[in-house]
Amino acid sequence: MKTIGIDIGTTTISAVVMETEGRKLLASRTIPNGSFIQTDREWERIQDVSLLMNKAKELLDSFLEEFPDTKAIGLTGQMHGMLYTDAAGRCVSPLYTWEDGSGDQPEFDGESAAELVTRKYGIFAATGFGLVTYLYHVKKGLVPEGSVSLCTISDYLGMWLTGRKRPLVHAGNGASLGFYDTKNWRFREEMIVDAGMDLSMLPEVTADVKELGTYKGRKVLTGLGDNQASFLGAVGMQEQVWQVNVGTGGQLSVLSDRHFEAPGIEARPFLENRYILTGAVLCAGRAYAILEGFFRSCAAAMGLEDKEQYGLMERLAGEAREDAGGLQIVTKFKGTRVNPEVRGRIEGLSEENFRPENLVLGVIEGISREFYDIYGEIYKGTGIRAEKLIASGNGARRNPALREALKRMFGAELELTEFREEAACGAALSVLYVR
């Protein structure tokens, strides 16, 4: 069966065509997202929904014309963020992305919406979570007029394609909004009401992949979160195989039959009533890009040509001692989900090791250590070993030194994903799990 998968990411929109028998990739296209809206609020990170829909439709229609025997359309996209819809099922707001900082603003007696939720209800909440953003809007009187529901961007694409008036979201996307009890697969309605939010705004949630409706005669399926879709595309349902995804940020994920959560570790609803245990690294590829910017600025200060320094950094990493000469770099430049205030640092500096090659390898080791710390927390709570790593994302694919560092640190076999667009491929394969 031929299926199309669409992934509305933060920086790109991707679409693939797959033959589900044998997991064969037939075609793949990626275009820039290019929809960020400039505002006078420096913490806002919002995108133009209409532009996103038109770009996704253009990709989809081109593939339907090229592959007219396509039977189904699977969806995925950036998690946590949200948008508002009206009674007709149309968007009445921008997309407030997962990077939006409204929930971190100290607007409420010096406390942010995220801090308020964590203190009052004892549940994990971060800025960018859809219901944290919604809570901020409720308290500030910013909920758009006519709003009757909210959902993620991939859920809205499903509504937009099929003409649905109310969102139906997979539990993985529902959980990404926040205020969700993943152990019992339900929103924490009592807390939501107590916080002053309107229960009727919540989307309907399903534990299974469902058919939303049709678009040009093809089934359109409920969207998966990009983490779940990426895992499905990269790992499938294999056990004790960990996915390390390195993009701007990063995630370490593994399939689990049991619910387990710890500070910084989420049990994300997956398929067949199972979970993906996931920890997030806020600065993965971003940390390496920050270092590249440092080298570029050094070159400019010396009057050299302003050009990309990644090739130089790869060479330097190969020249460094395996332990970076004892240099240790913490790469938490943007903090962590649990503690957004923590920052990176350099330790173990000496006259002998303060060299550019050690700086490069130190950053690479720092990124790897963040992933390994997540693994240690999950292993301690579940006993799930890392028999193999599957690396995905451009940050891993383009950085052989990082892949080698991960192999050393985990002591496990590592291979790159079969497909470059893992999330879009996972969305296409979700048709195999329709119930």
Image (cartoon, rainbow, N blue to C red):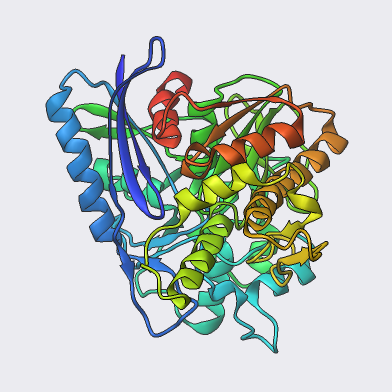
Judge by depth and name the residue closer to the eye, 168 or 280: 280
Extreme-bottom residue of the structure: 109
**Residue 256 against residue 87 in the figure, above or below:** above
Would residue 280 be found to the left or right of residue 328 on screen? left
Residue 14 position in % (x across, y down): 32, 41
Residue drawn at the location 75% of the way across and 65% of the way down:
346
Residue 94 position in % (x across, y down): 35, 67
Judge by depth and name the residue closer to the eye, 110 or 253: 253
Extreme-right residue of the structure: 380
**Residue 398 against residue 326 in the figure, above or below:** above
Q: Residue 146's image quarter? A: bottom left
Residue drawn at the location 74% of the way across and 47% of the way down:
369
Residue drawn at the location 70% of the way across and 63% of the way down:
191
Judge by depth and name the residue closer to the eye, 321 or 417: 321
Residue 117 position in % (x across, y down): 70, 69
Q: Is residue 135 visible in the rendered structure shown here?
A: yes
Extreme-left residue of the structure: 65
Residue 287 position in % (x across, y down): 58, 58
Q: Residue 426's image quarter? A: top left
Quadrant where the N terminus is found in the figure: top left
Q: Is residue 216 visible in the rendered structure shown here?
A: no
Extreme-top residue of the structure: 21
Residue drawn at the location 30% of the way across and 64% of the way down:
48
Query: How many numbered markers are drawn?
Result: 0
Judge by depth and name the residue closer to the eye, 389 or 118: 389
